[in-house]
């Protein structure tokens, strides 16, 4: 594997491409799953821009979305190398069942509290995921994770601050925050269910089941601190990694892909 | 301020006049004429509103950007605009008008913002045209404002201009890529430039003989060049860039004038300008309604943040 020139501090889709690392097929399949999680979440966060409750949040949600998009681009660029393709081939020219993201990320934004609930769950998960992935035997994945972990730390801080503000702010915000958690919580279980794309990648991929304990402890602590209750709702069956999705992904992809698909082969 | 001028006012006025004569900066604590203060609040808040409303026509394409790289660039750009709005509101606040008041004026439709953002963005090429033409015109307007007499405004403009020139290059690059692309892409670029060219030229405001506030603003060292001078400068910059792009500027009267050392160009349709200004542009009501909706939908969020901050402050006092 040629990954010698990929540096963790400066890793970008361009530097990954320039380094010419070619992902082994199994690693590529795994990276597609992670990349799709980040891409679909970034697309949802992009919907907030110019719609946020205050200008500072237009900036903050935009920032988080941009970071997620950056992770997606690095992961998909690396994955695409296995098939001699580009990040855009993967993002724009796959169909809905070919997307491998976990379902949590495709859920609609709902109100601000629902978005914060999704972001809180996602950020707790990403922090432990990328911390673990930093130790991956695949140097490109490790470098992408090392850059991402600093960013998702900030995302977690942002969503925890809002969880507290909304949980403890007013009666209305408390109720909305609880409802937001209730809406998102059934989709947390899927994050820790066995990842079919990680099979056979010991030492390279992160076994999601190993992240569960940390997730439960961290979320329980902040949810309690915000005066909220951990929802008791059962987990949905999930299956995003195998290409099963909620009805929300199709319209999201239709929008994301519409222009690129109208001009196949064009450069932008 | 009442008519009766005090001794302090007289000393302040003399110092203010001296600052302008010496090309020095006026700072928030300095004495300044009420008219100067009002003009600045109006101009800076309008500029801030323009940045905020200007997020919408480009935000329209974030979810549909045709490559991930373009999506990232566009998201960063729209976010920069929110940032520009924030520091312009801060600059205006130093003159004693708070942000909530200015924002209220925006979402109730009382405040003006640049009319250009009342045009719509039906195609991706509009992301290129906005960068190249609209940001390009904004830069011509704004670079001289880095030398405006009011310190906080001038300093905000230095930062904004740096980012705007980056945006303009990105817009140019979008169009260049389209012009080097398929026939459909080239047509998309040309059609978009056709729509944005004249509105961009009108961003400099009405012709000098029809611009009532310009003279006073120039005397106050806020405005440095007349509308028509800036417009000429812009056209002189555009023509060679259009040649590089391979797009045709939609004005058959554009021609190099050896004698003047400038490009001649045709008359603009000022009736359209005044129509859009009067609220009859393609998207005036939509833009304001969208921001208002976001603001109203977010009221409970801001209220919760305030309640939380207050409770924490009380806790700190009690402990």
Image (cartoon, rainbow, N blue to C red):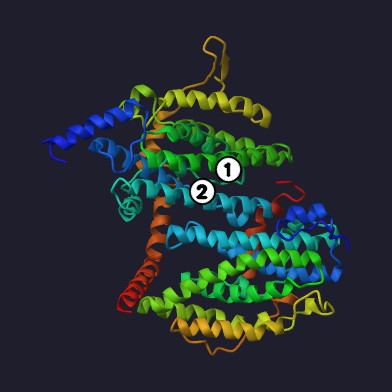
Under circle 1, the secondary element is: helix
Q: Eyeballing the image, is B119 above or below B260?
A: below
Toward the right, the furthest residue is A1
Q: Is residue B84 visible?
A: yes
Please rate how many residues cluster around mark 1, counting C-alpha atoms within 10 Å: few if below 14, some from 14 to 19, many from 20: many
The residue that mark 2 highlights is: B57
- Label 2 is found on which chain of the structure? B
Q: Eyeballing the image, is B285 above or below A224?
A: above
The residue that mark 1 highlights is: B126
- Label 1 is found on which chain of the structure? B
Q: Residue at x 32, y 54 (%)?
A: B104
Q: Is residue A115 visible?
A: no
Looking at marks 2 and 1 on the same chain, the residue that comes earlier in the sequence is marked by 2
Q: Quadrant of the N terminus of chain B?
A: top left
Q: Residue at x 35, y 43 (%)?
A: B112
Q: Eyeballing the image, is B160 above or below A122?
A: above
Residue B184 is situated, as x and y percent measured from the top left of the image, at 70, 41
Residue A47 in the figure: left or right of residue B223: right
């Amino acid at each position: 594997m040629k990954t010698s020139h990929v540096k963790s501090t400066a890793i970008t889709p361009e530097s990954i491409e320039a380094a010419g690392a070619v992902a082994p097929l199994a690693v590529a399949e795994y990276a597609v799953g992670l990349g799709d999680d980040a891409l679909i979440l970034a697309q949802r966060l992009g919907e907030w821009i110019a719609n946020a409750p205050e200008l500072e949040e237009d900036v903050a949600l935009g920032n988080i979305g941009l970071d997620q998009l950056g992770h997606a681009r690095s992961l998909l660029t690396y994955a695409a190398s296995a098939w001699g393709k580009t990040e855009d081939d993967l993002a724009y020219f796959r169909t809905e069942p070919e997307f491998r993201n976990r379902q949590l990320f495709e859920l609609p934004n709902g109100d601000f509290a629902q978005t914060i609930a999704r972001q809180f769950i996602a950020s707790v998960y990403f922090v432990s995921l990328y911390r673990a992935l930093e130790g991956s035997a695949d140097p490109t994945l490790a470098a992408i994770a090392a850059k991402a972990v600093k960013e998702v730390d900030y995302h977690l801080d942002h969503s925890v601050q809002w969880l507290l503000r909304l949980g403890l702010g007013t009666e209305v915000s408390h109720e909305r925050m609880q409802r937001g958690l209730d809406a998102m919580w059934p989709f947390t279980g899927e994050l820790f269910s066995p990842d079919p794309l990680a099979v056979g990648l010991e030492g390279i991929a992160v076994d999601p089941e190993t992240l569960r304990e940390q997730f439960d402890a961290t979320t329980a602590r902040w949810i309690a601190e915000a005066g909220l209750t951990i929802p008791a709702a059962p987990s949905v069956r999930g299956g995003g990694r195998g290409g099963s999705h909620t009805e929300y992904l199709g319209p999201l992809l239709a929008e994301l892909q519409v222009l690129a698909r109208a001009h196949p082969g064009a450069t932008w | 301020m009442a008519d009766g001028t005090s001794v302090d006012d007289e000393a302040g006025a003399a110092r203010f006049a001296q600052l302008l004569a010496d090309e020095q900066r006026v700072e928030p604590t300095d004495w300044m004429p009420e008219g100067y203060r009002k003009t600045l609040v109006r101009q800076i808040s309008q500029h801030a509103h323009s940045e905020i409303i200007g997020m919408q026509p480009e935000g329209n394409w974030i979810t549909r950007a045709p490559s991930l790289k373009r999506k990232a660039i566009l998201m960063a750009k729209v976010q920069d605009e929110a940032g520009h709005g924030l520091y312009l509101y801060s600059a205006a606040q130093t003159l004693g008008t708070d942000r909530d008041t200015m924002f209220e004026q925006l979402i109730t439709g009382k405040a003006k913002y640049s009319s250009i953002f009342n045009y719509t963005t039906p195609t991706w090429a509009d992301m290129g045209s906005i960068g190249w033409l609209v940001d390009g015109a904004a830069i011509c307007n704004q670079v001289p404002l880095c030398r405006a007499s009011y310190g906080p405004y001038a300093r905000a403009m230095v930062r904004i201009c740096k980012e705007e020139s980056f945006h303009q290059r990105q817009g140019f690059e979008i169009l260049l890529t389209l012009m080097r692309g398929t026939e459909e892409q080239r047509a998309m670029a040309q059609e978009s430039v056709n729509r944005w060219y004249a509105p961009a030229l009108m961003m400099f405001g009405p012709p000098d003989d029809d611009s009532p506030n310009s003279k006073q603003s120039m005397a106050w060292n806020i405005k440095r060049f007349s509308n028509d001078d800036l417009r000429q400068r812009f056209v002189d910059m555009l023509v060679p860039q259009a040649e590089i792009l391979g797009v045709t500027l939609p004005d058959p009267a554009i021609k190099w004038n050896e004698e003047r050392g400038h490009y001649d160009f045709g008359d603009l349709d000022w009736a359209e300008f005044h129509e859009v200004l009067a609220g009859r542009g393609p998207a005036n009501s939509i833009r304001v309604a969208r921001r208002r909706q976001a603001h109203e939908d977010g009221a409970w969020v801001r209220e919760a943040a305030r309640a939380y901050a207050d409770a924490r402050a009380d806790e700190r006092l009690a402990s």
